Amino acid sequence: MIETIEDLFRRQAIAWPQLAAGLRGLAAARTRRMKVGWSDVYLRLIPHRLASSTAATDPDSVAKRPCFLCGSNMPAEEEGAPFDDYLIIYCNPFPIIERHLTIAHREHRPQRIAGQLEYMLKLAAALPGYFVFYNGPECGASAPDHLHFQAGSRRLFPIERDAAKLPEAASAGYSRNVLIFRDRNESSIASRLNKVMELLEQSTCFGIEPMINLAVHCDSGRWTAYLFPRSKHRPWAYYTGELTVSPAALDMCGVFVTPQPRDFERITAADIEAIYREVTLPDDQFRRVANALEKRL
Ligand SMILES: [Zn+2]
């Protein structure tokens, strides 16, 4: 699969001007390493993410625009590589990280994680050196109407290093609440992740599905999953116009995106830590879910 993806990037970087522009944008991106608590967060200035960071994802706005993940609406130059019977892998024309991919379902169907974990785990196993991630329809997906994952190179993937020092349910002492799972057995990790979704559904879900960001990678048959339960899509500072930030899986994993130069210059580690706290599930609710999970497993 990796060779197929490398070929796809080589061909698309030449044939598809929008991707070529995105890759130039990524090459020119500025990055600032910051200490947020004890961990490193990489703040990245990427102006081409502005449309995505500010995308209106309410049902009315989404219904009014042509879906950019449906093959019939894609530019003629955009080409994908099939994966399994249901998914197609595309180069993301607005990359945040190296080898940024979008993996879309062949059919236009809503963004839901239920029943899809198995595909995510298989993708991760097929893409060593990458991580695969999912943004829920109400916390980061700019196409909540079309089922998709994303993936990218783990050359910059700060949470992987943090995780070596973290317990399975990390909250106290870490800047954001995250559940970490490690497993060599695909059905066992899928069933543990499904249990978390059930517990979150019972205790926190008032919308389409429990709000989560999820990242998964697989090395020599061992999966690692990072699940961030969320309480909010965007922080208050977004709505007041103070900061144009819209945290999704990548931001939670430690690559924090700012499309606006003024935010890149002035945002502090304390701001980032406060934003993480604001958008993840509050500590008391997180603890309850983590404890219930421990009892059930
Ligand atoms: Zn679609």
Image (cartoon, rainbow, N blue to C red):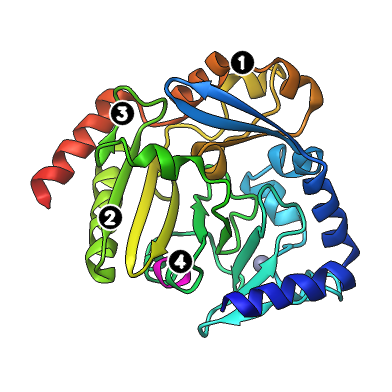
Marks 2 and 3, the one that precedes in the sequence: 3
Q: Residues within 10 Å of mark 1 (few under 14, many from 20)?
A: some
> Which dot, 2 or 3, sits closer to the camera?
2
Cα separation, mark 2 vs mark 3, equals: 17 Å
* Label at residue 182: 2
Cα separation, mark 4 vs mark 3, equals: 25 Å
Amino acid found under the numbered disc labelled 1: Thr
- Circles 1 and 3, Cβ within 8 Å, touching? The answer is no
- Indicate yes or no: mark 1 CB to ligand 1 under 8 Å: no
Q: Identify the element where label 1 is drawn.
A: loop
Which residue matches tag 3? 171
Kindly identify the residue that appears in the image at 70 percent across and 70 percent down.
70
Marks 4 and 3, the one that precedes in the sequence: 4
Question: Is 123 within the magenta?
Answer: yes
Which residue matches tag 1? 268
- Indicate yes or no: mark 3 CB to ligand 1 under 8 Å: no
- Circles 2 and 1, Cβ within 8 Å, touching? The answer is no
Cα separation, mark 4 vs mark 2, equals: 13 Å
Kindly identify the residue that appears in the image at 68 percent across and 69 percent down.
90
Q: Residue furthest bottom?
A: 85
Amino acid found under the numbered disc labelled 2: Arg
Residue 273, relative to residue 90: is it above or below? Answer: above
Marks 1 and 3, the one that precedes in the sequence: 3
Residue 158, relative to residue 190: is it above or below? Answer: above
Q: Residues within 10 Å of mark 3 (few under 14, many from 20)?
A: many
Query: Whole-percent x and y of residue 194?
Result: 28, 58
Give residue 288's quadrant in the image: top left
Which residue matches tag 4? 124
Q: Identify the element where label 3 is drawn.
A: loop
Which span is picked out in magenta?
A: 120-124
Question: Is 191 within the magenta?
Answer: no
